[in-house]
Image (cartoon, rainbow, N blue to C red):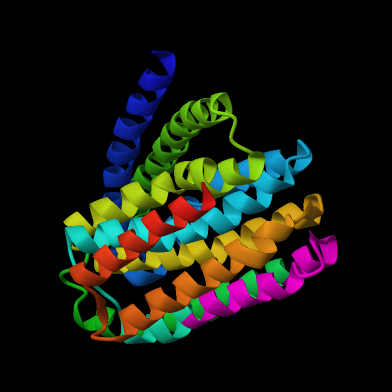
Amino acid sequence: MTTALFLLGGLVLLFLAGEILVRGSVLLALRLGVSPLMIGLTVVGFGTSMPELVTSLQAAFAGAPGIAIGNIVGSNIANVLLIIGIAALVSPIPCPTRSVMRDGGIMVAAALALAALTMGGVLTRTDGAILVLGLAVYLVLVWHQERRKVQGPADGAGDDAPKAGAIAVAREIGLVLAGFAGLVVGGRLLVDGAVDLAQTAGVSDTVIGLTVVAIGTSLPELATSFVAAMRKQSDIAYGNIVGSNVFNVLGIAGVTALTHPIAVPAEVVRFDIPVMIGVMLLMTVFAATGARLSRSEGAVLLGGYAAYLLVVV
């Protein structure tokens, strides 16, 4: 009964927090003069990945490398196949060409870098430093390009945008922070209940990391992208997933390895990381064809996730 209440309470809290986060993020983007895509790739994408960071760090220090790396890889697979699949079914997601080429390309390149660094079976502190440096370079690139692209149109549409007063900005930041807090608490409730059920069923750490924990820590992305799709905020929906995937690989894997080297299970190197790269490539191809992710493509992604779970479990 307690597990069921955790699962239900976590689910409700996630979607309420997702609504608050999307609303606050869109207003914050307007007030700061940056694009919603920029906010989706950074503030929302990275913020919704905080549960993955906490979980991977805790697992690494607890001596559960299967959960630490499985959570990162499994979350990225779930982000693409499950979350984008559901969001595209709710509403087709327009994908800006510049973001598909730049951010989609960097997402795939980051996954390839992770594959290369884990070939030896361990992610060292040096590897972690390389990944974190890559994240820093990506952030600088996105910030400069998105600021430059928004400043021109923003000048002409200044009368329609909210005025950027200190109180207004603080209010929108408060909404964003409240949304993040709700996502973290809701995700924690769901993960605790789900892991308890999985352990009772005798499932291994690696499988729990790749499935139960990965899905659970990806629920903030699901809630945010679902709400963004319903509200027709396509830049938030798309940017959230791409930004989260980049942060998972470069930021979470990097920071976790810097603090505690991660032993990578052989099955993750042989199967799950290649699957992660493959689904990222598939998503990028779908986004590039027609400059959007359609409902039929969303259905294909969801079907792919069902097949993945059947193989892993």
Q: Position of residue 55 (x, y in %)?
A: 61, 41
Q: Residue furthest top?
A: 1
Q: Position of residue 186 (x, y in %)?
A: 41, 33
Rendered image quadrant of residue 124: bottom right
Q: Residue furthest front?
A: 311
Would you say the magenta stretch is mainly helix, strand or loop?
helix
Residue 147 in sight: no
Q: Position of residue 73 (x, y in %)?
A: 58, 58
* Vertical side of 188 occupied by 85: above or below: below
Rendered image quadrant of residue 199: top right
Q: Is residue 187 left or right of residue 225?
A: right
Which residue is drawn at the image coordinates 59% and 35% (left, top)? 203
Which residue is drawn at the image coordinates 42% and 14% (left, top)? 2
Q: Is residue 312 left or right of residue 263?
A: left
* Vertical side of 26 occupied by 109: above or below: below
Rendered image quadrant of residue 250: bottom right
Q: Position of residue 312 (x, y in %)?
A: 53, 52
Magenta stretch: give its range. 105-130
Which residue is drawn at the image coordinates 38% and 30% (left, top)? 10
Q: Which quadrant holds the N terminus?
A: top left
Whether residue 119 is in magenta: the answer is yes
Q: Is residue 256 left or right of residue 11?
A: right
Whether residue 188 is in magenta: the answer is no
**What number of labels is visible?**
0
Residue 66 in sight: yes
